[in-house]
Image (cartoon, grey):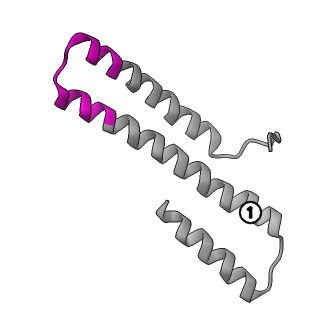
Amino acid sequence: MNEIVEPHQSHPHIVKRLRRADGHLRGVIEMIEAGRSCLDIAQQLHAVEKAIAQAKKTLIHDHLDHCLEKAVGPLDRERRSSVDAFKEVAKYL
């Protein structure tokens, strides 16, 4: 389960997004320690949450687009439509 895979083209973008989220999270901690308003803190926490969720979504979609395609290989039209439907529904994760 801990296999090492070749980095995908999206990985540097995901790392950049997560580093940004990490910086914002550190800022939230500082805001709490400084006694900033709950509204300000909640807004920043929302931004952190969205950044992490988007990183996860990008990673999952990249995996579906590359790893799943590689694993299943060429498929006939009927099977291809099942894979395409799965990829489409995964957009709502």
Query: Which picture quadrant has residue 25?
Result: top left
Q: Quadrant of residue 67?
A: bottom right
Q: Which picture quadrant has residue 48? A: top left
> Of 39 and 74, which appears nearest the observer?
39
Identify the image quadrant of the N terminus: top right
Residue 68 location in percent, x, y? Answer: 74, 63
Q: Secondary structure at mark 1?
A: helix
Q: Is residue 63 left or right of residue 47?
A: right
Name the residue located 60 percent from the left edge and 57 percent from the top edge.
61
Task: Decide if residue 81 is on the left or right side of residue 73.
Answer: left
Residue occupied by mark 1: 68
Q: Is residue 74 left or right of residue 36?
A: right
In reply to whether residue 65 is colored magenta, the answer given is no
Q: Residue at x 43, y 22 (%)?
A: 23
Residue 85 pos. (x, y %): 60, 77
Specify start and end residues of the magenta stretch as a single range: 28-45
Q: Main secondary structure of the magenta part?
A: helix
Judge the density around disc 1: few (<14), some (14-19), many (≥20) Cα neighbours within 10 Å.
Answer: some
Q: Going 35% across and 18% down the picture, which residue do you hit? A: 29
Check the image and report above or below for 90 versus 47. below
Q: Nearer the viewer, residue 10 or 29?
A: 29
- Looking at the image, the residue that sits furthest to the bottom is 78
For badge 1, the amino acid type reads Leu
